[in-house]
Image: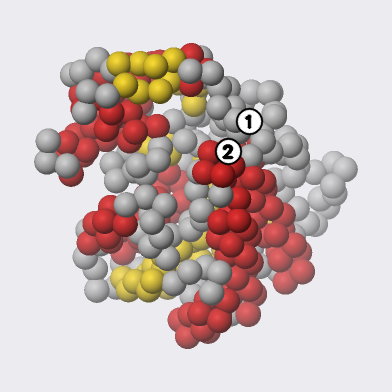
Amino acid sequence: MKYLVTGAAGFIGSAVVERLTDMGHQVVGIDNMNDYYQVSLKEDRLKRIEHDSFSFRQIDLADREGIATLFAGEQFDVVIHLAAQAGVRYSIDNPLAYADSNLVGHLTILEGCRHNKVKHLVYASSSSVYGLNQKMPFDTSDSVDHPISLYAATKKSNEMMAHSYSHLYGIPTTGLRFFTVYGPWGRPDMALFKFTKAIVNGDTIDVYNNGDMQRDFTYIDDIVEGIIRIQGVIPQPTPDWTVEQGSPATSSAPYRIYNIGHGSPVKLMSFIESLEDALGIEAKKNFMPMQPGDVYATYADTQDLFAATGYKPQVGVQEGVKAFADWYRAYYKL
């Protein structure tokens, strides 16, 4: 099969490309290679994908003509859309970047799928869409109408845009709400990367809400496995579905939303302790109040994803954090 993977130089995107090419598929990857974090890390992720069946194009999602030409020329079977401007806190100071990448960019991908008979669009949503929700675990049947960051609002918008295209044009779309992905080759703006860099340099780490937080940390290999399995499960319309009686995660259109997480939240202080154990260094901690746009806890109900794919995460926090610490030491030659 022929795949388009957007965000191919990103943390999750590069891992998905590597897995698809290992499976023998033909993959075209795109990325705008922006400098939100160091471009060299993105370039190094691409270098590890050594397959003749992979080709890379540097292109921005907001380039309407460029994306349209790409779709028309390549005729993809499946699109795995992982590119976006990431970061909750960055969205507070740089909101317009999210309009270009996350809204306009998502629309160009939907248009490409519409005009070129793509069989399945799988795209990245986020656990941040749960916003002010307090019922745990977060369930895709819950309302997600109260995001608390622009980033979260754009991800909710992506789900709504996808639904409209599924309804109007019959495009099968699947949105995946990722829960705190971590692991080797991860993003430098994420907590694990920042903590590790500070600890090995002898610097202080900022611990928000005085450490009283929980996250459903999900290891990268488990995320990739979930994506690979769900891309083969093409959503079907549910004919008797109604807004009043149906789940928001399903529809009378070929549309589906899943949580993709470990399904077991971990206390932030326990996560930090796992990192201290892996590095053999005790962190210097600066306890701080909650940041704007942040939430106290995330916890994924993943029963629907398991029912659809048999996917169940395998990697616990201690194992996953150690794998990241080992990678960090090797990558930076410490």
Secondary-structure class at tag 1: loop
Residue furthest front as drawn: 93
Secondary-structure class at tag 2: helix
Q: In the displayed structure, would residue 51 be above or below residue 184?
A: below
Amino acid type at mark 1: Phe
Question: Is residue 63 among what the camera can see?
Answer: yes
- Disc 1 residue crowd, few under 14, some 14–19, many 20+, Cα 10 Å: many
Looking at the picture, how far across and down is residue 321, in whole percent?
Answer: 30, 29
Q: In the displayed structure, would residue 290 be above or below residue 182?
A: above
Reading the image, the residue beneath label 1 is 138
Report whether 76 appears left or right of 333.
right
Residue furthest right as drawn: 244
Report whether 143 appears left or right of 229.
right
**Residue 177: numbered disc:** none
Q: In the displayed structure, would residue 21 be above or below residue 198?
A: below
In which quadrant of the rendered image does the N terminus lie?
bottom left
Q: Residue at x 51, y 79 (%)?
A: 66
Q: Residue at x 27, y 24 (%)?
A: 203
